[in-house]
Image (cartoon, rainbow, N blue to C red):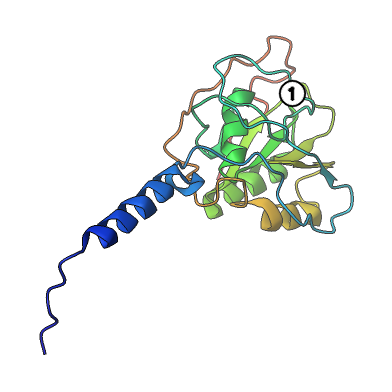
Amino acid sequence: MQRPHLVPSPRRALITAAMAALLLASPLAAQDEGSGEPTPAPPEIAGLETFEVDSAAHTEDDVDYPQDPPAGGPHNPVWQSCGFFEAPVRPEHAVHSQEHGAVWITVRPGLPERDVTLLQRLTERNEYILVSPYPEQEEPVVLSAWGAQLRLEEATDERLRAFVRAYAGNGPELGAPCDGGTEETLALPAASPVASPVATPTA
């Protein structure tokens, strides 16, 4: 049986237009406008720090973040593509990736090859992992998400996987991509004791 063709009344058309306007004005319609709120219900992970993020504004300027490495805040309009980088990335790009749900894993120069291999494989299995050197940090490995951070002595610590399970893909902009951004990197400090802080492991 064929359905009758419905001709919208003026009132129905008005309601439909109003609903469309509300949807366009909602945060869901603007993928790149996050709430700036920290990820709710932090898991029970020893050593986990959580923070309130006051702003998710876009800026072209360098940002003085309260955490080092950063764990959310104002950021560049362009995010850093997730993946494994052998040179530092600009923090303002990485924070935008955190807003999209990335776990930014920063490593100190001289990380053991077994840890490097583990992190490389992690980026291959999880599209919301960003790994890059961060020569300024004291700890060998730091995991930073939007509003959360965990400092570790080695990448083989079981808490790394717990943090990734809790925060990867779970930023203020749920469903936003972590690819298709910039792959720009920064020059390594001249005083670095190694040519590459995370040397590519051999097969």
Label 1 crowd bin: few (<14), some (14–19), many (20+), radius 10 Å: some
Residue at the bottom extreme? 1
Compared to residue 30, the image places residue 124 above or below, namely: below
Residue 63 pos. (x, y %): 67, 18
Q: Report x, y in % for residue 150.
A: 80, 43
Q: Which residue is mark 1?
A: 65
Image position, residue 75 (x, y; %): 60, 26
Relative to 24, residue 162 above or below? below
- Give, as a three-letter code, the residue at label 1: Tyr
Q: Which residue is pictured at 73% across the width and 27% down the height?
A: 109
Please tell me in which quadrant of the rendered image residue 198 appears: top right
- Quadrant of the rendering where the C terminus is positioned: top right
The reply to whether residue 201 is in sight is: no
**Numbered disc 1: secondary structure:** loop
- The residue at the point 46 percent across, 28 percent down is 182
- Quadrant in which residue 154 is drawn: top right
